[in-house]
Every structure is written in C-alpha cells, then in structure tokens.
C-alpha cells in the first residue's frame, strides 16, 4: 500500500492481478496501467513526483505509472 501527495491510496491486489486506487473522497477504482497486464502485483510505492511503481512479481519486473 502507498499514499501519494494528494492523499490517494494505492493497494496492490495480487490475488486479482490489479492495483486499486482509493481517492480521498473514498472512490475506489482499478488503476489503468496503460495496457500492461499485471501478474500478481505485490507492492507499490510513490515517489516525490507522484509516479507510481508496482512490483509485478509474476512478470519479474517493476512497472512505472506516471
């Protein structure tokens, strides 16, 4: 789980191979990864610029969502 500067929360949902974004208003939605298919995303992190990094465990990579 990670929180960005705006207070939005990102949750790695490995069982469903997706990342869920929960806004400060409580709205939850599946995060768009620009057409990339995630396979067991295990964790997420946000940098100071607001970029999201996802450890895509099943695909052995780290995905950056700008």
Image: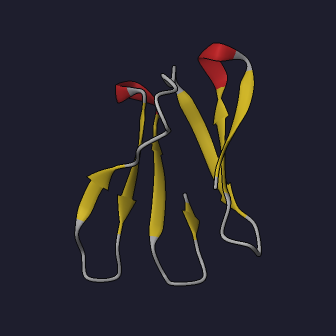
Q: Position of residue 6 (x, y in %)?
A: 51, 84
Residue drawn where x is 61% and y is 15% of the image: 58
Residue drawn where x is 27% and y is 54% of the image: 29
Q: Quadrant of the N terminus?
A: bottom right
Residue drawn where x is 22% and y is 69% of the image: 27
Q: Position of residue 7 (x, y in %)?
A: 49, 82
Task: Residue lying at the far front in this picture: please name it.
Answer: 34
Q: Position of residue 37 (x, y in %)?
A: 48, 22
**Residue 7, relative to residue 42: is it above or below?**
below
Q: Position of residue 36 (x, y in %)?
A: 52, 26
Residue drawn where x is 62% and y is 44% of the image: 43
State how many labels appear.
0
Please identify the quarter of the rendering in which residue 22 is found.
Answer: bottom left
**Residue 55, relative to residue 2: is it above or below?**
above
Q: Quadrant of the C terminus?
A: bottom right
**Residue 48, relative to residue 20: is it above or below?**
below
Please identify the quarter of the rendering in which residue 52 is found.
Answer: bottom right
Q: How is the image coloured?
A: secondary structure
Horizontal side, residue 7 vs residue 52: left or right: left
């Amino acid at each position: 789980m990670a929180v960005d500067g705006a207070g939005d929360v990102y949750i790695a949902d490995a069982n469903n191979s997706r990342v869920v974004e929960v806004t400060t208003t409580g709205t939850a939605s599946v995060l768009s990864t620009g057409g990339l298919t995630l396979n067991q995303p295990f964790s997420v992190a946000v940098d100071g610029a607001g970029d999201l990094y996802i450890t895509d465990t099943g695909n052995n990579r780290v995905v950056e969502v700008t």
